[in-house]
Image (spheres, helix red, strand yellow):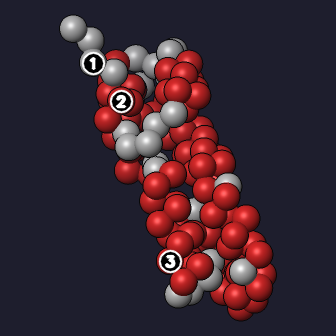
Amino acid sequence: MYQNPYMAFPGITPEEMAFLQQGTADLTENQKKYFYMVYSSKRKSPQDILIFTLIGFVFVAGVQRFVLGEVLMGLLYLFTGGFCLIGTIVDLVNHKTLASEYNRKMAYESYHMAKMAAQ
């Protein structure tokens, strides 16, 4: 029986799974394996973003933004105390959206890497 490898990702949503399946439909099997390898190393789960945001709320503001690769926003959060905690609270509420947007960018990047590498 066919096992969908994307089911192994922690916190994967049906929307993300549909996006990944649709986006990788035109890849060969070797390209799909390469895509999965690259994407799984870059993907962030919403739970991880929530944990990093909580760390930023309690200790050092902006940790979640650094993890997401948003260095300038991370520095801004760091120096302003997470916009006086308001920005950090907004990130607590929107942690799933932050993870989804980041994962979508990483999926595009991984797709192009798979297309070029495993011809």
How far across and down, in percent of the image, does residue 91 sit? 67, 64
How far across and down, in percent of the image, does residue 42 sit? 45, 51
Give the class, few, some or many, for how many residues have Cα within 10 Å of label 3's Cα (few <14, many ≥20): some
Vertical position of residue 58 compared to residue 2: above or below: below
The Cα–Cα distance between marks 2 and 3, rounded to whole angstroms, is 28 Å
Pointers 1 and 2 in contact (C-beta within 8 Å): yes
* Relative horizontal placement of residue 25, taking residue 76 as reference (left or right): left
Q: What amino acid does circle 3 point to?
A: Ile
Camera-nearest label, 3 or 1: 3
Q: What amino acid does circle 1 point to?
A: Gln
Mark 2 and mark 3 lie on one chain; the one further toward the N terminus is 2
Residue 8 in sight: yes
Find the residue positioned furthest to the top: 1
Residue 70 in sight: no
How far across and down, in percent of the image, does residue 10 sit? 38, 43
Query: Which residue lies under the disc numbered 2?
Result: 7
Camera-nearest label, 2 or 3: 3
Give the class, few, some or many, for how many residues have Cα within 10 Å of label 2's Cα (few <14, many ≥20): few
Q: Quadrant of the N terminus?
A: top left
Q: Secondary structure at mark 1?
A: loop
**Quarter location, residue 2:** top left
Q: What amino acid does circle 2 point to?
A: Met
* Relative horizontal placement of residue 38, taking residue 79 as reference (left or right): left
The residue located at (66%, 86%) in the rendering is 78
Q: Secondary structure at mark 2?
A: helix
Query: Which residue lies under the disc numbered 1?
Result: 3
Camera-side residue: 42 or 17? Answer: 17
The residue located at (51%, 33%) in the rendering is 13
Find the residue positioned furthest to the left: 1
Vertical position of residue 107 compared to residue 51: above or below: above
The residue located at (47%, 66%) in the rendering is 51
Query: Which residue lies under the disc numbered 3?
Result: 55
